[in-house]
Image: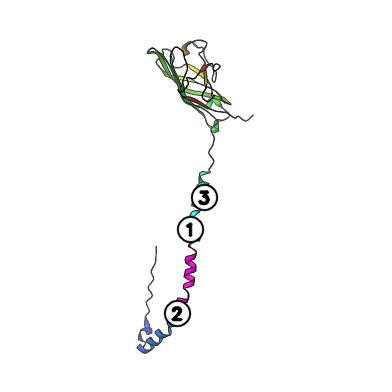
Amino acid sequence: MKRRTKIVVLGSALLLTAGVASAATASDTPRQRTTASDAPRQQATASDAPRQQATASDAPRQQATASDTPRHREAAALTGTAKLYRSAGDDITFSFDAHLAAEDKADPSKATGTFAFGHYLNGEGARAEVKVDCLLTGGKVAVVSGVITDSDLPGAEGKRVGVTVHDLGRHDRLGYSWASTGSPVDAKELPKCVSSAPFEKVLKGTGDFTVLPWRPAL
């Protein structure tokens, strides 16, 4: 914001004669010349503009520095969706969104998230949604467990189930806690983070699972 200042001269200066005023005006001419001689100073000031431009060009550096703020890596995770291979054409799908926060690194039972699965053949089958209560990962293998919160399979709600995933790129494998019983309903009380070996294969081109390895302080 520019401020303008007006200087008002009062008093006897107003009573000066015209001749004295003219003489004083004439005597000011050298001052104007001197001012004109100061032009190089203005030019020099103008030549400083590249410095300002250089300063402005430094802005990307500041932005880059701001973007370098470290983000906390979560302790473990299992994500992704894929179908399992069955020669008979069964439609079996598993989806995972399970996470263990960095601050809960020492306690896998504080994992959060959900996972879901469904098994259909010839229009018949069932599906289930699960609330995660434990997540353990090591290398590219994950074991996740949780309690079924919603299902159209009678007797399934309230049951704890576990799933194992081996992240092998395009050749992932999967196993589940009811592999030996055939149904989650028939399984006995299951501890957290317990499942079977990953004996099932993912159907090529139907999706992918991603495992973020857990790195506990040992």
Q: Mark 1 or mark 3, which has the lower sequence index?
A: 1
- Callout 2, which amino acid? Arg
Residue 33 tag number:
2
Q: 56 and 170: which one is in front? A: 170
Residue 71's place in the image compared with 125, above or below, is below
Image quarter of residue 10: bottom left
Estimate the spatial distance between the alpha carbons at disc 1 and disc 3, rounded to whole Å.
Answer: 14 Å
Asked if the residue at tag 3 contacts the one at tag 1, i.e. Cβ–Cβ closer than 8 Å, the answer is no
User: Quadrant of the image for the C terminus?
Assistant: top right
Q: Residues within 10 Å of mark 2 (few under 14, many from 20)?
A: few
Residue beneath the point at 50% across and 57% down: 54
Mark sitting on residue 53: 1
Q: Residue at x 40, y 85 (%)?
A: 26
Q: Which residue is mark 3?
A: 61
Does dot 3 land on a helix, a strand or a loop? helix
Please name the amino acid that badge 1 sits on. Gln
Q: Is residue 52 magenta?
A: yes
Q: Which residues are magenta?
A: 36-53
| Residue 147 at x, y percent in the picture | 47, 19
